Amino acid sequence: MFLVDINAIRLFIRLLLGLILLSVGVSKLLHRSRFERGMKEYQILPGFLESKLALSTVLSFSIPLAELVAALGLISGLVLLPATILALGMFLVFSGAIIINLVRGRSDLSCHCAGALGDHHISWWLVGRNGVFVAGLLVLLLTPSDLFTVETFVRSPSLLNGTFLSVIIPVVLIVGVILLTVVLIDSVRSL
């Protein structure tokens, strides 16, 4: 019988979601003006805040920065609880913005997901995908901390023995293959 250790599951979730958030955060920062226009297209930011504070401009910087902070926290395991909560909040807000526009009948909008996730028209499928991400983050919140964090390895370098490497290397390879597959599929879809 094959049993998967909860530590391996947590590491898989952390690396997958962390790398996704890292790729989308970097992409949004590199294409900030496109991301800002996209937020305006969604028509959910309060008009008075947009006119007084240029809220979309502020958010076009702060959202990608928050994605990068959450990504680094998830990948490294440092400040894991705040990083997980931050990522959870972002995916819920993004899903809410998509749902509002789908209910309005505006499915022609780009998701502005960027990075490894690519850009697609908003759909209920994207809401479901984000739901899977939220479920993964809830697993991180509701299960005991795993041993595969930078802090653990700094405190106890002896943990980098064969047992740990036998978990880390396969999980990293699986995450890499999944992300590469997602990027390739997105590339083919955009041809």
Image (tube, grey):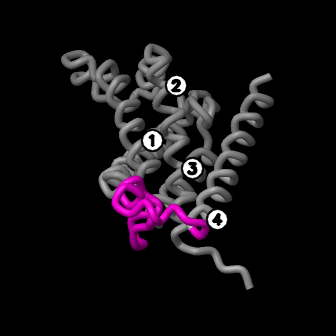
State the image coordinates of residue 137 (x, y, percent, origin top left).
Answer: 46, 58
Q: Earlier in the sequence, mark 2 or mark 4?
A: 2
Q: Tag 1, which secondary structure?
A: helix
- Residue 110's place in the image compared with 77, above or below, is above
- Magenta span of residues: 140-163
Residue situated in front as seen by the camera: 127 or 176: 176
State the image coordinates of residue 67 (x, y, percent, origin top left).
Answer: 41, 37
In the rendered structure, the answer to whether residue 149 lies left or right of residue 179 reads left
Q: Nearer the viewer, mark 1 or mark 3?
A: 3
Q: Which numbered tag is attached to residue 166?
A: 4
Q: Nearer the viewer, mark 4 or mark 1?
A: 4
Using the numbered discs, state the Cα–Cα distance from disc 2 to disc 4 in whole angstroms: 32 Å
Q: Amino acid at mark 3?
A: Leu
Q: Which numbered tag is attached to residue 16?
A: 3
Q: Which numbered tag is attached to residue 49?
A: none
Q: Amino acid at mark 4?
A: Ser
Residue situated in front as seen by the camera: 181 or 96: 181
Indicate whether residue 112 is drawn in magenta.
no
In the rendered structure, the answer to whether residue 176 lies left or right of residue 66 reads right
Q: Which numbered tag is attached to residue 27?
A: 2
Q: Tag 2, which secondary structure?
A: helix
Q: Amino acid at mark 2?
A: Ser
Using the numbered discs, state the Cα–Cα distance from disc 4 to disc 1 in whole angstroms: 36 Å
Task: Categorize mark 1 by other alpha carbons within 10 Å: few (<14), some (14-19), many (20+).
Answer: some
Q: Please tell me in which quadrant of the rendered image residue 33 appears.
A: top left
Question: Considering the image in quadrants, where does the C terminus appear?
Answer: top right
Q: Nearer the viewer, mark 2 or mark 1?
A: 2
State the image coordinates of residue 144 (x, y, percent, origin top left).
Answer: 40, 73
Residue 80 in sight from this viewpoint: yes
